[in-house]
Amino acid sequence: MIKAVKSFVSPAEFTGWHMFTIICMFFGTIITVNMILAFNAGSTWTGLVVKNTYVASQIFNEETEKLEHQRAMGWTSDLIYQDAQLRVQLTDSNGALIKNANVSAKVGNPVHETNDHLVSFTQIGDYYVVENELENGLWQIDLQVQTKDGVAWSKAIRLEVEG
């Protein structure tokens, strides 16, 4: 009986295999956590706003003034993606449709630039329309509007395509 209690209480011999198992479990845990965090960071990150923050900081005040001026104009855009078509309707501060403008956009994924492309819209009725097949996922549409009388307006729109 004493021998059984003594073998239960006294530790077994610690061998190299025990140390190897501890090291594998330790580094396996760290690698697993790093992989989970890297996957979550990559799948939730929506991309850069600017490539060079120093240069962006130099023109921050001018860009802020442009955005405030555009916001004061009161223009709105209604973007629809349906049947491989981007359709946008533009209205001014009074709710009147903005017609006969040159409308273009840079369309791309916010995370990488491999799918970035420029499109030009054509006015059809109350909408500006362009044929553009988009894959499932998050898209950034940088809309640029130039009216015949020289008024410029732009807006960045995030669009999620599900299918």
Image (tube, rainbow, N blue to C red):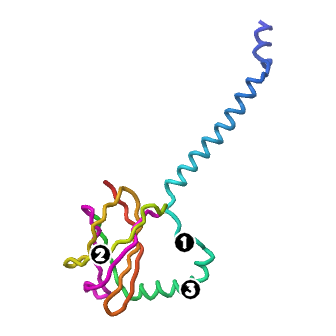
Report whether 95 appears left or right of 39. Answer: left
| Res 69 → quadrant | bottom left
> Which residue extends farthest top?
1
Q: Which region is colored magenta?
A: 82-110
SS at mark 3 in the image = helix
- Look at mark 1 in the image and give the residue it sits on: 50
- Look at mark 3 in the image and give the residue it sits on: 61
Q: Mark on residue 121?
A: 2
Q: What residue type is labelled 2?
A: Phe
Please say whether residue 95 is visible from this viewpoint: no
Q: How far apart are marks 1 and 2 (CA)?
A: 25 Å
Image coordinates for residue 90, horizontal then vertical, percent: 30, 80
- Which quadrant holds the C terminus? bottom left
Between tags 1 and 2, which lies in front?
Answer: 2
Image coordinates for residue 75, horizontal then vertical, percent: 35, 84
Relative to 96, say whether 1 is above or below.
above
- Asked if residue 96 lies in the magenta stretch, the reply is yes
Q: How far apart are marks 3 and 1 (CA)?
A: 15 Å
Q: Which residue is drawn at 29% across and 74% down?
A: 88
Between tags 3 and 2, which lies in front?
Answer: 2
Q: Distance between the residues labelled 3 and 2?
A: 31 Å
Relative to 144, say whether 48 is above or below.
above
Relative to 153, say whether 157 is above or below.
above
Q: Which residue is drawn at 21% across and 79% down?
A: 126
